Image (cartoon, grey):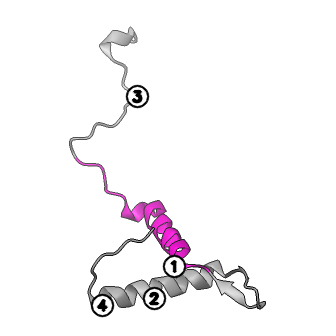
Amino acid sequence: MWINFPIKLAARNKWDEAISLAQKNIGSVGKDADGNYVDASVGSCAEVIAASYILDPNNSPEEGPNEQQETDVPSADSGAI
């Protein structure tokens, strides 16, 4: 599958830097027919970059003021009052 989208040159430079770093972190993924080590594919690197971004708690939006949080306060219906 191919995904094509336009990006500016500065974004392309950061993308290439991120792919290079991911390839270094993943390491070689095997050898080709000639015995040369093979780097991780761009697709594998993109998956690692996306997973890293998603799992980083700093990238999750904070709860808004309208979202209710659970409390341990007993309600009138529970008979605990």
CA–CA distance between discs 2 and 4?
Answer: 11 Å
Q: Which residue is mark 2?
A: 17
CA–CA distance between discs 1 and 2?
Answer: 12 Å
- Kind of residue at disc 3: Asp
Q: Which residue is mark 3?
A: 72
Q: Secondary structure at mark 2?
A: helix
Q: Nearer the viewer, residue 71 or 49?
A: 49
Of the numbered discs 3 and 2, the one sitting upstream in the chain is 2
Q: Secondary structure at mark 1?
A: helix
Of the numbered discs 1 and 4, the one sitting upstream in the chain is 4
Q: Which quadrant would residue 39 be assigned to in this image?
A: bottom right
CA–CA distance between discs 4 and 3?
Answer: 50 Å
Q: Give the vertical position of 42 relative to 71 (above or below).
A: below
The answer to whether any part of residue 81 appears in the image is no
CA–CA distance between discs 3 and 2?
Answer: 48 Å
- Kind of residue at disc 2: Glu
Name the mark nearer the viewer: 1 or 3: 1
The answer to whether any part of residue 48 appears in the image is yes
Q: Which residues are magenta?
A: 40-64
Name the mark nearer the viewer: 3 or 2: 2
Quadrant where the N terminus is found in the figure: bottom left
**Residue 42 - label:** 1
Q: Residues within 10 Å of mark 1 (few under 14, many from 20)?
A: some
